Image: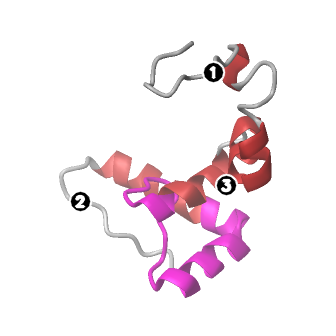
Amino acid sequence: MCFIRISADLPARHRLVLTAARTLLSLRHPFLVVRFARRLGYAPNPAAPTRHDESMLWRKIGDHNPLFVTLTDKLAAKACPQSPNGFGGSKTRPISGDGIAA
C-alpha cells in the first residue's frame, strides 16, 4: 500500500522525502487512507497530490484552515456570504439584474 510511483526525474533525496512523508501520513491517518483506497480503487499519495481527490484528502489531513471547514458544510457556506462581513471581512454588495454592483 505504501508503494508509490515517483517520476525518475526527481533526485534521490526528494524521492526519499516524498516516500517518508507518504508513509508517515498513511500511518497517521489509516482510516482515511483505507477508505480512500476502497472507494476509488487506488492508493492515494497525500504527500504529493496530483489528482483532485488526493488534494481533498491532503486538505482533510494537513490543511487546518477553519474557513475550509465552513465551506465544506453546505448550509454554513450558503449563510457565509449573507453574513454582514462576508468572506475575508469585506462587505458584500447587492448586484442588480445587469450584473453591475448597485
State which mark lies toward you, 1 or 2: 1
Which quadrant would residue 66 be assigned to in this image?
top right
Q: Type of residue at label 1?
A: Pro
Residue tagged by mark 3? 61
Residue tagged by mark 1? 94
Residue tagged by mark 2? 7
Residue 31, percent across and down? 72, 75
- Give the residue furthest to the front: 97
Residue 95, percent across and down? 56, 23
**8 relative position to 98: left or right:** left
**8 relative position to 14: left or right:** left
**5 relative position to 91: left or right:** left
Which quadrant would residue 94 be assigned to in this image?
top right
Q: 48 or 66: which is nearer to us?
A: 66
State which mark lies toward you, 3 or 2: 3
Residue 48, percent across and down? 43, 53
Q: Type of residue at label 2?
A: Ser
Sequence order check: which comes first, mark 1 or mark 2? 2
Tell me how far mark 3 sits from mark 2, CA to CA. Answer: 24 Å
Q: 90 or 21: which is nearer to us?
A: 90
5 is higher (above) or lower (below) than 83: below
- Please give the name of the residue rendered at 73% of the width and 15% of the height, measured from the top-left corner: 89
Element marked by disc 1: loop
25 is higher (above) or lower (below) than 43: above
Sequence order check: which comes first, mark 3 or mark 2? 2
- Please give the name of the residue rendered at 63% of the width and 80% of the height, measured from the top-left corner: 34
Q: What stretch is highlighted in magenta?
A: 25-54
